[in-house]
Amino acid sequence: MLGPVGETEFDLRFYCFGVPVRVHPLFWLVSVFMGWGSGDAKSIITWVTCVFLSILVHEMGHAIAIRRYGFPSEIVLHGMGGYATSRGFTTWRNVWVSFAGPLAGFLFGGVVVVVELLILQYRRDWLANRDVWLFFEFLKFINFYWGLVNLLPVLPLDGGHIMQALMMKYWRKKPQQRVLEISIIASGGMAYWAYHSGERYVVILFILLCANSVVQYNELKNHRRW
Ligand SMILES: [Zn+2]
């Protein structure tokens, strides 16, 4: 859905373990917007910090997998999350590169749980501080819940890319059409579920993803290219 995100003079640039990282200003804006309902300014800053850390870890997972295959990678964090640049790989390398992001998030989430358990054991009073407690809650939520949602077979989520790589290799009859059909059904189903669960951001996100797949599906059916 997202092409390369243009550079601006407000981009934050740094290196993370040798991988160049660029943070587009919209990343901060969208993160603040999403955390707006979490309470006071301190909670919003905690939320934005957790989103930043978690998405960086996720993209580092992709970038490390890409580098492992001998290609350079750059991480860009933007308004709709982030991406790590990659090249065309074979099917299983594609699957691994796509899965490495969520996997890094699950591992990070696991570390967060262990640290929280240690604090509960030895420094229980720290968690009495609402911001410390929120920090752990946000990190667990983003790394586990978003990580799982991201594995749904919906383009252009990581799960969608995994499904696409496998279908293109193993499904003989019109694989690209099947990929988009699965993406439409899964995103539509998720939007429906989220609507009934009252998760408004998830509803908006999956309606957009569903519409994106429908447009691609129509393009494919009409053999139009632009
Ligand atoms: Zn990813």
Image (cartoon, rainbow, N blue to C red):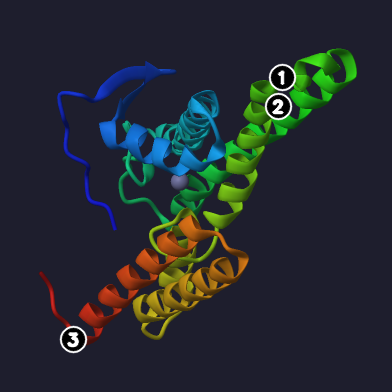
Q: Is residue 57 left or right of residue 129?
A: left
Residue named by callout 1: 129
Contact? badges 1 and 2 (CB < 8 Å): yes
Q: Residue at x 77, y 21 (%)?
A: 128
User: Is residue 71 placed above or below 10 in the rendered structure?
Assistant: below
Q: Residue at x 71, y 34 (%)?
A: 110
User: Is residue 58 placed above or below 133 in the rendered structure?
Assistant: below
Residue 71 in sight from this viewpoint: no
Where residue 208 sits in the image (x, y, percent)? 35, 65
Residue named by callout 2: 133
Q: Earlier in the sequence, mark 3 or mark 1?
A: 1
Neighbourhood count class around disc 1 (C-alpha, 10 Å): few under 14, some 14–19, many 20 upward: few
Of residue 54 and residue 164, the one placed in the foreground of this image is 54
Amino acid type at mark 3: Asn
Q: What is the distance, in whole Å, between disc 1 and disc 2 at their CAs?
A: 6 Å
Where residue 91 sits in the image (x, y, percent)? 44, 58
Q: Is residue 202 left or right of residue 72?
A: right
Residue named by callout 3: 222
Where residue 194 sits in the image (x, y, percent)? 56, 66
